[in-house]
Amino acid sequence: MNLRARVGRHLAVCAVAATASAASADVVYFGNQNLIINSDFNGLYLNILTGDYNTTGGGGSSVPGGWHINPYGSTGLSWYQSGSNGVGYMKTASGQPLSNLAVGTLIDSSAFFSGGGASTNLTLNGESIVGFRFTLSGGTHYGWFRVSLSDTYAGQPRSIVDWAYESTAGGGIDAGAIPAPGAIALLGMAGLAGSRRRRG
């Protein structure tokens, strides 16, 4: 890589970090999780604060305490949510459930959220980023998760790859924002896509 290209890349990374930092003050990131979403009625129950998950479903002690999101389905992929944690998924501009967000899209109180629904807007044979919100100690927090799908919504492999949330109540987060030394970077744009870093 020549000097001009290196300088250009450095400036682009700095711009990404500066842009993301304005929206995301203190991001908590769970990277390289790759949690399988079973192709059945139970699917996957996930507590996004602790990373605890369970695939057996069925209620009671088999579901992790304080769970937030629950993707499931044997003929498709639907999304359920914990009402007790105020979970909502970011909708598309036309009001459809689970918007597939571009990296850098701001997730905050200006967005529209709803309960779960079908995954008709998510990318098959690839990955999608979904924005969400939840409540904690009376405050609203915003986050994103990345889901990987096969060539059908019901087929395997399908998984939640990673996720992040803003630990400051009311603070927005950019889709794909992850903590990096001294700044916030955007997933895949600063060469950090494969790393696991957590700051809280």
Image (spheres, rainbow, N blue to C red):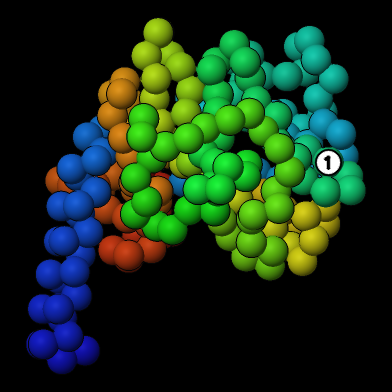
In this rendering, would 65 be left or right of 180? right
Q: Is residue 88 above or below residue 71?
A: above
Q: Quadrant of residue 66?
A: top right
Name the residue furthest bottom. 2
- How many numbered marks have been drawn onto this rendered protein structure? 1
Q: Is residue 48 above or below residue 177?
A: above
> Which kind of residue does numbered mark 1 sit on?
Gly
- Name the residue at 15% across, 46% down: 182
Where residue 40 appears, as percent x and y from the top left, is 87, 39
| Most foreground residue, 173 or 26 | 173
Judging by the rendered image, the residue that carries numbered circle 1 is 73
- Name the residue at 77% across, 46% down: 77
Where residue 126 appears, as percent x and y from the top left, is 62, 65
Where residue 140 appears, as percent x and y from the top left, is 39, 20
Q: Bin the neighbour count of mark 1 within 10 Å (Cα to Cα): few under 14, some 14-19, many 20 and up.
A: many
Judge whether residue 46 can be spotted in this image.
Answer: no
In this rendering, would 45 be left or right of 171? right
Label 1 residue SS: loop
Q: Quadrant of the C terminus?
A: top left
Q: Is residue 190 above or below residue 131?
A: below
- Name the residue at 40% across, 31% down: 142
Q: Quadrant of residue 68?
A: top right
| Most foreground residue, 111 or 123 | 111
Judge whether residue 85 can be spotted in this image.
Answer: yes
- Name the residue at 40% across, 57% down: 103
Q: Quadrant of the N terminus?
A: bottom left
Where residue 4 appears, as percent x and y from the top left, is 11, 87
